[in-house]
Image (cartoon, grey):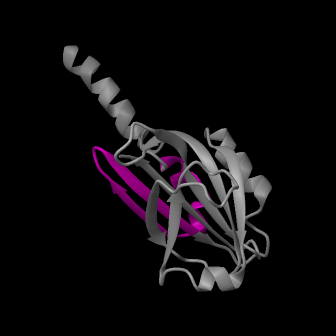
Amino acid sequence: MIKKLILIPFMTILLCCDRVMPGGLWNKFETDLRIEKQSDQGPWGGTRAYYWRSETMRYFNKQKIFDFASSNGWSLIDSVKYQAEESENSKGSSITIQVGPFETDASSEVFLEQDFPRWTNTGLTLYKFKTGWVIFYPDTNSSTEINGFISVSENGREMAVYHLWGE
């Protein structure tokens, strides 16, 4: 009987892993259109990146994305548009996500930069979300929950999610 009581919470966590692991909620989003999935999870922090592509124009629209994100506890904070030239000239085959206070003031200090795979080479909009998970700024006592990012190509055919957490 005691073994069963111990086994039940363990199995619950194991079966609900997508919700327990940071960013795992995106495992269930449009699985038939997902092209790429990367995850590096450790005891003190981690990253996740997903990429989807559709043949349908405007398939990945704001309503669909925001509904899914908000129903899973992600709150939209800000967005930034990048022209095709800015995206194409970014750092090789990666996109650099900057974690900071996210004021619109360009002089805002960037506390952390993380390189993720860059799958979209067109103009895009990058949405910034508060995720309920925390990232701690290096060498400070400060942290933020604004650590989830969704990029959508200007034609709405490509979407990527980037999430980082921990120290």
Q: Tag count in the figure? A: 0
Tell me the residue at 49%/80% (across/down): 91
Tell me the residue at 70%/52% (across/down): 78
- Camera-side residue: 99 or 62? 99
Say whether residue 16 is left or right of residue 5. right
Q: Position of residue 2 (x, y in %)?
A: 21, 14
Quadrant hosting residue 161? bottom right
Specify the segment rendered in magenta.
24-51
- Camera-side residue: 2 or 77? 77
- Camera-side residue: 163 or 109? 109
Q: Residue furthest front?
A: 107
Q: Is residue 32 magenta?
A: yes
Quadrant hosting residue 3? top left
Quadrant hosting residue 14? top left
Say whether residue 15 is left or right of residue 27. left
Task: Decide: is 31 above or below 131.
Answer: below
Task: Decide: is 10 above or below 87.
Answer: above
Tell me the residue at 51%/57% (across/down): 110
Task: Decide: is 38 above or below 104.
Answer: below
Q: Position of residue 160 (x, y in %)?
A: 58, 66
Tell me the residue at 62%/80% (across/down): 87
Q: Is residue 2 magenta?
A: no
Q: Position of residue 77 (x, y in %)?
A: 69, 47
Q: Position of residue 51 (x, y in %)?
A: 55, 68
